[in-house]
Amino acid sequence: MTSYRLASGGAANRGRSLTFTFDGRTYKGFEGDTLASALLANDQMLMARSFKYHRPRGVVTAGSAEPNALMTIGAGARSEPNARATVVELYDRLVAVSQNRWPSLKHDFGALNNVLSPFLGAGFYYKTFMWPALFWEKLYEPLIRRAAGLGKAVMQADPDRYEKSWTHCDLLVIGAGPAGLTAALAAGRAGARVILADEGFRLGGSMLSESAMVGGMPACDFATTTVEELATLPNVTLMPRTTVFGWYDDMVFGAVERVQKHVATPSPDLPMERLWRIVAKRAILAAGAEERPLVFGGNDRPGVMTAGAIRTYLNRYGVAVGGKVAVFTNGGSGYRTAADLVARGVDVTAIIDARPGSADPVPQGIRVIRGGSVTDTRGWHRIDGLIAERSGFEEVIACDALAMSGGWSPVVHLMCQRGAKPVWSDEKQAFMAPDLGGAFVAAGSAAGFDGLSDCLKDGAAKAHTVLESLGRRALPLALPRVEGEYDASFAPLWYVPGAKNKAFVDFQNDVHVGDLGLAQREGFRHIEHTKRYTTAGMATDQGKLGNINTVGIVAGMRGVSPAEIGTTTFRPFYTPVSFGALAGSARAEHAAPVRTSPLAGWARKNGAAFVEAGPWHRSAWFPREGEKTWRESVDREVLNVRANAGLCDVSTLGKIEIFGAGAAEFLDRIYCNGFLKLPVGKARYGLMLREDGIVFDDGTTSRLSENHYVMTTTTAYAAEVLSHMEFAAQTFWPELDVRFVSVTDQWAQMSLAGPKARIILGRVVQDDISDAAFPFLAAKEVTLRGGLRARLFRISFSGELAYELAVPAGFGEAVADAIMDAGHEDGICAYGVEALNVLRVEKGHVTHSELEGRTTADDVGLGRMMAMQKPDFIGKRLSTRFGLTAADRLQLVGLKPVEADKEIRAGAHLLKDQAKPSLANDQGFVSSACFSPTLGHFIALAMLKSGRERFGEKIIVWDGLRGTEVPAEVCPPVFVDPENTKLHL
Amino acid sequence: MASLITCPHCGARPKEEFSVRGAAMPARPSPMAKDEAWHAYVYIRDNPKGRYQEYWHHAAGCRRWLVVDRDNLTHDVFGVTDAADFVQARGIE
Amino acid sequence: MRYSAYSIFKQALSGNRLWTPAWREPEPKPHYDVIIVGGGGHGLSTAYYLAKEFGITNVAVVEKGYIGSGNVGRNTTIIRSNYLLEGNNPFYEFSLKLWEGIEKDFNYNAMVSQRGIINLFHSDGQRDEYARRGNGMRMHGVYAELLDREQVRRMMPYLNFDHARFPIMGGLYQKRGGTVRHDAVAWGYARGADQRGVDIIQHCEVTGIRRENGVVTGVETTKGFIGCNKLALAAAGNTTTVGRMADLELPIETHVLQAFVSEGLKPVIDHVITYGAGHFYISQSDKGGLVFGAEIDFYSSYAQRGNLQTVEHTMEEGVSLIPGLSRAKVLRSWGGVMDMSMDGSPIIDRTPVDNLYLNCGWCYGGFKATPASGFCFAHLIARNETHHVSRFMRLDRFERGYTIDEAGKGPQPNLH
């Protein structure tokens, strides 16, 4: 046995045993274990394969920077790829599977790459796989793709739910180690609203792993006591299992809380993860420091771990990572690890210290090789020895684990996410947090402090400074006495040259020192080039472990200070965040809210089929018994409207009430046609342009009283039109007295169309609606039988005698029912948006199929509406530009198939008869097409080059996508009742 | 900026309540102005790097158009005013 | 040094110690025939084609950072030519054709992968729009297919067909669309240009444009004055800043677009997919990361970073379209700073200043344009006449009323 659980000790709950599997084998661990500590306790050091060379890998850290020990956790739709075993909290029946290996973790064919590695250096793929060209997509790329990647995504819908929340605080403390705890305590006692967030499942940070005594008790117990006090403060919120992953503008922090990632059977009443947006007045980054690996030959063998990680497994989890542990260090951390191991009865074979001398206390009987280095390691699935070198002499030292410590890098990631760069410190031999001016400061080892007592002190001190800037006084915190802390200072050692084996800087991506050298030789000298060319720092740990070593090594190769090299850019996310957490509940059917018409109930009763129209669900057609296709229903509805009458829900049209003495003038400037002279009681069709002279939207506006109008817009542009008018009123013409309110949801609106519309409506409306009393384009308030006040407009989209009736939304369904009853004897039918569309195409009315953001009023035959005599309207000035008035523009025309049984489809293009399909011959396109039951053949609206000059011309409707070519005749776009006689019945 | 906007009417509100239109400095020319002025108003943007005045609409709030005076490099906000006040202060060409 | 399997083999035998720099690091000469401002994809490809196609090799590319530090190194790597308008389609098709031969051309494997791009549609109206676009492509000889729901399901069974808020009805599919390894494009062009004598001068910021009698004579830089006969701007994201040095008035606003990459996953998404009910688009890199994005952040920004709301919105669309992503993890987000032009289309043209040439306004579609942009710009610079596929991309089209408004949104840059 090489790594094992000690008989006692550690913070894991030995009273509660948990069962889990890894690659199908069953193991036992304890509550409070991570998956990594439990695997180590079971002597499972081999946990993964590396990305490129498929080298055997163990765990190298005990935290979130872990680059190696990635596995897939969970089964079926709950499986999560690339989980870091070092941060996965063990739960009962956890299922873990290793990744990126075949056929097994122990015997992986991919390791062949390791042998081929001389040919697979940095960027090799840019230099080959080019011949023959076809082979890239057929052979090379599929092979590369299959070999690449880590875990598998199951691509099944997630059975769990996710949610999002905002929260606010005076002070956000990120990290609950020594500095974070004292910062939170100082601020909490002073009454500030504090959030203390930590990525771990247990608060305490490094104090959970260190053997020092704090305040007369083990550091771990001190952390627990402090957390217990914090938990009693009502103004302090503790957020364990919460990773602050991003710092955004205005002191908004993104954080993800893993609410149920650690439970065997998630409760349906809780989210799996919760996304927090934390708005903090101040923030303290107390995220600690990351211990640097040393870079030497074979530094990636399973069993080679950071010294701090070995202490964590030992002290926190009661796990010895080996029976014979060697130490390679350039600072105090290695000595502390050795001392802790010895204290727990674990053999330490040697300490190899790169420094010629140091004052670090050496555990009794342990050999120290000062001024030495490890040049190489041995073993395959696990380290079994190392080669130590001093003064040119080499010796082999047997070991089954190797602690390495290359010094410390403050974790400054979050503070550098918004453009500020970390600052190199020669004194600390590390990149330090930038000065961000006080709202966001680093504390403890994140601020470069080494010792435990200094970190405890700095946390409190930073909290005091921050509180003062918020105008709060805090009492000084009595700091506990620390005994037995070690000196964490170190001497720089970027890498050990002369290794035969590769010395890795980025473990997961298999980037080694040789790759960095190659990148320099080939001119990829900027650190971003080095990164991109070698992929150093691009693995799932985003270089947390290796980037600073990369910088140091490149600096060494170039003979400059790391300050001159600088770091690559820090960007969110601090650690990877699930899509699920970021998406929250807005997914599947809940991706966007559904807007429902007040007449939806009426439509359902009448058997409607519904269709999505932007956010709306609209009634599309109303199938009746015996109708097998939607076309049968639509044809019947159209014919019935033309012969009798139909009722259609048009509530989705935007409705805007406009008030004020300046309303008439305002409308006159907003629309391109005149509105000043619109009398009270009248509706008018209006066309709005954008300032560039292109049509924006159309609709009708009715004057209900002197200073009160109601406007309808298209369904699609309702919101845009209101915003546009508000903008114009506020910034163009603030002198005009005009106000707007959207009433789209307040009114149910229905269109009653057909020759029998008046007869039917007369049975519902009290007022006189005879043609004389209520002619075409009349608009006024009426009273329905029963007393309900309603708005009635005599406007028509279908070309029939038609009315739009608007009633308060809550009455919509009752009124629609009443109209259906009233019209029963006259053959009324319900009709949907499909029939409405056919009716309007037959009548040649345009919609956003024609008004598609590139058409002028003249293009669609409405040029005469432009009241150029008006001094000003939006779009007037730029509408006369050459390109917008050129003779060869596309113009609205109608199309009829030459052979009556041929179908024309929207989206087809137009060719001159006999012309070959080519861009040069492209004459335009079909914008709207339908079968016209009234005419008995397909008809279409189209935009055709100089179209209005070409009525009568035979043209080819070319639909290459669907393989049809239909000869058609160009005609005026109005197919039914061009004289408008039916409107005025 | 851009995470939270302090609306002069509603206080600090999240970005998703707003929509952004663009540069606030170009003033709509008089109907009589030259073609060049109209072209510049509609199409030409000063687009400075740094301090920038931009139209934001509190669409899911008070529905007022606002001018956010901000730095488009650092995303600092210097102030938010009602667009009507901004226009009055800017003057009309 | 020519790259090949043989060169890799030979170099490996000597411990990979004899590889030579992919490009030189020259000091600027006092004068060049052409100076290109901007060592991004477009600037480097312009230099490459100037040298290779037009025989102009006395060229410098001056770059304020490192080459490829702008948008060519921070995009979502998609190539396609499925454009609607006559002003765009032939240009992007020309670009796609250049992509298809680019690796042989510049002897660098940029991993051009024509895995197919699909634009999903979710309504009849959207189908008609895509049919119009697809037929326009076909008219130009660019193959496109209109797939129905079941055809899409067979190709991409993991999409949300059964519980979608906006059901997938089909898609417009261009088989020749795909992805390219973005950094390799910058490096391949740089190396190719360098081999033909172009000086690539990194860490050299242009601080002024010198004119004499209205004619450009050179640039002031952080490495001193460099003279030239012709000056070409290809500084997308900073076009206004550089253009102002020559008093150019431009129809450009600068915006930030975020993009994302997930942790490495075994291959699950074999195509480039765009979501028609939102702006989400996604593909999977050869390394295994899912590369995706959605909308811009909407406000003007020169910061290469965005905000959390846009991040969340992107993920919402992603999980809505591909529910199986939910438990995968996003690794990194970044922001690209773009020239958003007033009609959403680019400008490749002369300027009112003699000998000053302009290439800008790529919005968020610049990557796929890289080869054609460089070729057409080089054509314009070398011959002083517009290449026919870029003939609509004029600077004066706004005044003349010939905008190329692919989205139909008008003169509001953040809507394109």
Image: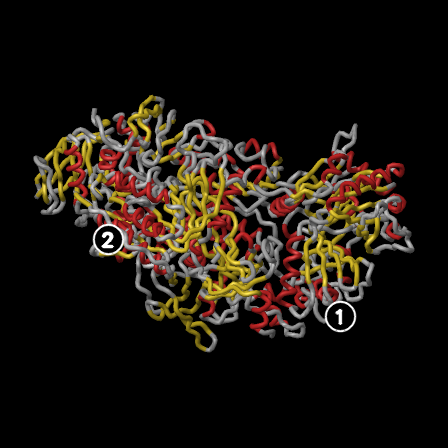
Name the residue that disc number 2 marks: A555
Q: Which mark is residue A501?
A: none
- Residue C347: x, y in percent? 53, 60
Name the residue that disc number 1 marks: A869
- Residue C407: x, y in percent? 60, 53
Decide if residue C131 is in sight here: no
Q: Are marks 2 and 1 in contact (CB under 8 Å)?
A: no
Of label 2 and label 1, which has the lower sequence position?
Answer: 2
Instruction: Note whether C318 is above or below B73 in the view shown.
Output: above
Looking at this view, is A584 or A901 the one in front? A584
Label 2 crowd (10 A; few <14 / some 14-19 / many >=20): some
Q: Which color scheme is applied?
A: secondary structure
Looking at this view, is C327 or C353 the one in front? C327
Please state the chain letter of the residue tagged with numbered disc 1 in the rendered image: A
Indicate the amino acid at tag 2: Ala
Callout 2 secondary element: helix
Split into 4 quadrants, where in the image is the N terminus of chain A?
Answer: top left
Q: Separation of disc 2 and disc 1 at Cα?
A: 73 Å
Quarter of the image holding residue A176? Answer: top left
Instruction: Note whether A622 is above or below C365 in the view shown.
Output: above
The number of numbered badges drawn on the structure is: 2
Give the left or right position of residue A424, taking residue A946 as reference: left
Indicate the amino acid at tag 1: Gln
